[in-house]
Amino acid sequence: MSEFFHQYFDFNIMGAHFSEILEGFLRNLLLFAFAVVLSLAFGLFLALLRQLPGRKFMPLRGLTIAYIDVFRAIPVLIVLFLISGGIPYLNFLPKDIRIPHWLGQPDPFWYAVVGLTMVYGAYMAEVYRAGIEAVPAGQREAARSLGMSHGQTMRHVVVPQAVTLIPAPMLNEMISLLKETTLASVIAYSESLLLGREVLAETFNSSAVMLSGLMFLVVVLPLARLVDYLIKRNQTKITRGSHIEVA
Amino acid sequence: MAETMVSLQGICKRFGKLEVLKGVDIEIGRGEVVCVLGPSGSGKSTLLRCVNLLEPPEEGEIFIEGHDICKGPGSGTGAESWELDFVRQRVGIVFQQFNLFPHKTALQNVTLAQERVLGRSKAEAREKATELLERVGLGDQLGQYPETLSGGQQQRVAIARALAMDPHVMLFDEVTSALDPELVKEVLDTMRELAEEGMTMMVVTHEIGFAREVADRVVFMDGGVIVEEGKPADVLENPREERTRQFLGLVLDR
């Protein structure tokens, strides 16, 4: 039993590498911050493309649906490899794009931001869609019969209501995105898991990796509780008859 | 009859295989109040929603103020073959379920489209909205969200919201059917005032009393066609058609 504890919870190793792992974890959070903002925006953009009305937008709607389906189907890890292992060698692109070092961040950081945004944009588009479709049709009819255009109707009437219906599923996607920032370790972004694995390779001890996991736990657990709270709150609203559940 | 405001000719509407309207003709003159009665499923709400193209008809012609709102010759099928903007700048509608914007206050419900569609300034829109909400008796509820208003109050906000766009014609789609009985009167009173001011109105309703008092003409529909129409006194007191008699018997016997 003590062997087990030594392997996973060696406080000497945890202590010795704590600040290093924490620094790595802050890089996870930085990656998350970029990816979450971009995928929320990109997801909304995709969801809105998908809602464009009429026959003339059919091709665009089709492309959007195809994009969403494809990127929901491909593992994130493969997308990350396709980007980090391919983009640098596309010599027709300018060097700043092939090997980006914007804002003082290394290129793996940007590959990860792009890859996570491409995939999570597709996930989030589906969550937005659930929200948009849950807004009663009468809202759209009312706005349209007041003469508002499709765009005005979406912007001022549908989307503001849709986003209040989906905080719980949206937060779930965010939690999952936060955890998947660890995938950036395999494309050499030195976040907490990568640093933990280096310790593992040197010492044959998993405590540093465990430490990285514990840091996620500390951040994610309260968020998971928040999701539960939001779902519950939404249900109370339903019993009051004023909102629709889509979680 | 006064100048024709709305003219529907040979309107047909299908939902899949279900034929809801089977060639309906109707004319409404300026300032006229026409009440459309009929059992549920008779197509009366669909007819009303054809007028402002929420349900564009498959066949038939629609003229608003003498203007053919079909693009090109003959009628189109999809929403794209109709002049939506022309219609919606002139025709206002009030729904059974109010359809107020729940994330906006009463005042904002009435100002939103004024600012976005008509390009009125904030101050202008606000002034107009305040005036209209006072007129429907809600001058003290400007900052309330729909959730906190009664059904009758919500429906009056919805009427003010439609009027804010300066419509030439108002459509009412069973606007009192979702209301508690004691709230019906305040909404009907508002509509009565509107009629007295000379608004052109097409009213789908089950309120026979309102039709008798306020309507210039009553139209009775069943099975997707107009069965009978005429002055309220004639249609309601001495219906010619058996089907009308039957319906009125059931409604008035309650």
Image (cartoon, helix red, strand yellow):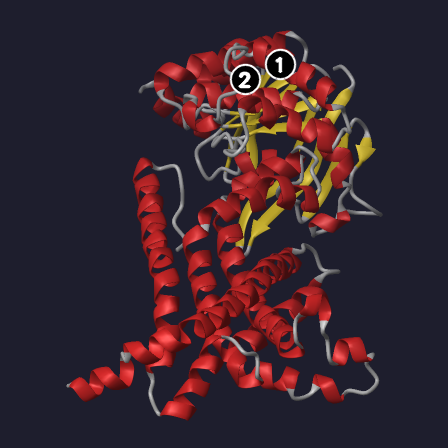
Tag 2 residue: B142
Q: Give the residue at x 54% y 21%.
A: B157
To which quarter of the image does residue B178 belong?
top left
Q: Give the residue at x 47% y 81%.
A: A195
Subunit ID for the residue under disc 2: B
Q: Is residue A157 above or below residue A44?
A: above
Q: Disc number at residue A2?
A: none
Q: Is residue B165 above or below residue B213?
A: below
Subunit ID for the residue under disc 1: B
Towards the viewer: B45 or B147:
B147
Answer yes or no: is residue B45 visible: yes
Towards the viewer: A175 or A5:
A5
Residue found at the far left of this picture? A1
Residue type at tag 2: Leu
**Whole-percent x, y for residue A213 in the image:** 37, 73
Tag 1 residue: B130
